[in-house]
Image: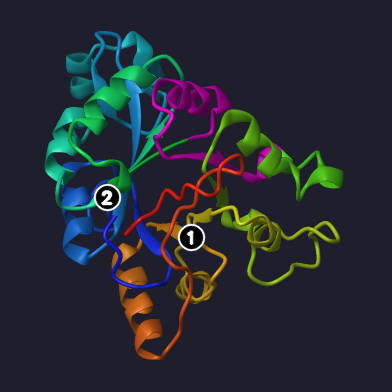
Amino acid sequence: MTRVSSLPLVIAHRGASREAPENTPAAFEAAIALGADAVELDVRRTADGVLVVHHNASRRGVPLALLTYPALVRLSRHEPPTFDTVLDLCAGRIGLDVEVKEPGFEAEVIEAASSRFPRDRLLYTSFEESVISTIKRLDPDARCGLLLGPGRLRSRAQRYEALPFDLAERCGADLLAVHQWLAPIRRRRRRVAGTDLLAEAQARAFPMMVWTVDGPQRLRSYLADGRVAGIITDLPGLAVETRRELLSGGQSGRDGRFHGSGRNRTNSAHVD
């Protein structure tokens, strides 16, 4: 992903999803026009084996795994694009963050994406540890991020700080992508005492991205924080403009590199 600054990457969540319907070619075109560093998208597979860019596991109550692609199109207000369509649209124009929603078709995703994108402009993410493990087994040099939401850590307060990194290490992830509630810039009264994932990530030299950051003040805070590798946002235009303002004011952040996993940090996987 071509870096325009030393501040965190700006990744458009399902494209510029406030400018056009999410996960559509129009949303991805808008993100490109707004100057985002990358677009994030969701990939699933239909019953007839088509990789499709679609967030929800079902459409009108029917699981995508039971729908053919033509049937999915008929049930959708906006035609869900195939993964190939979006890859062709974005290749050579913007970086890509591919969220693989479920296990079972990792090899197909890798084959399609890696044939169009160089490694330094491609990131695979998933909430499923098995997906990350499989991708790493199929392509050890692929860059992968483990996604974590608040529910995953809620019942494990005593190991709150270490657990995300343990999970990432176990599945081979190169970075963590966590919900902003798990990595607040300012401490909240209700947080478990002593928990600070951003500080822990910095201490471990482990890259961390934050999602989904949309408020103007939060955007500014995360973009100005050197511990943050990137933000995923529905407002890439505002984020790019905010980052530009921070740069003009002399702010500085990360060096723009997604460093390698804890097992091999000397080989850095970076975004130039």
Question: Which residue is most to the front?
Answer: 266
In magenta segment, residue 15: no
Question: Which residue is most to the bottom?
Answer: 249
The residue under label 1 is which amino acid type? Answer: Ala
* Location of residue 103 in the rendering, given as x and y in whole percent from the top left corner: 46, 19
Q: Is residue 181 visible?
A: yes
Residue contact at pointers 2 and 1, CB within 8 angstroms: no
Residue 172: quadrant of the picture:
top right
The residue under label 2 is which amino acid type? Answer: Gly
- As measured in the structure, the alpha-carbon distance from the residue carrying label 2 to the one carrying label 1 is 15 Å
Q: Earlier in the sequence, mark 2 or mark 1?
A: 2
- Looking at the rendered structure, the secondary structure element under dot 2 is strand
**Near-viewer residue (181 or 141):** 141
* Residue beneath disc 1: 229
Residue 72: quadrant of the picture:
top left
Report the disc number at residue 271. Answer: none
Please state the extent of the stretch shown in magenta in the rendering. Answer: 126-152
* Location of residue 137 in the rendering, given as x and y in whole percent from the top left corner: 46, 21
* Residue beneath disc 2: 95
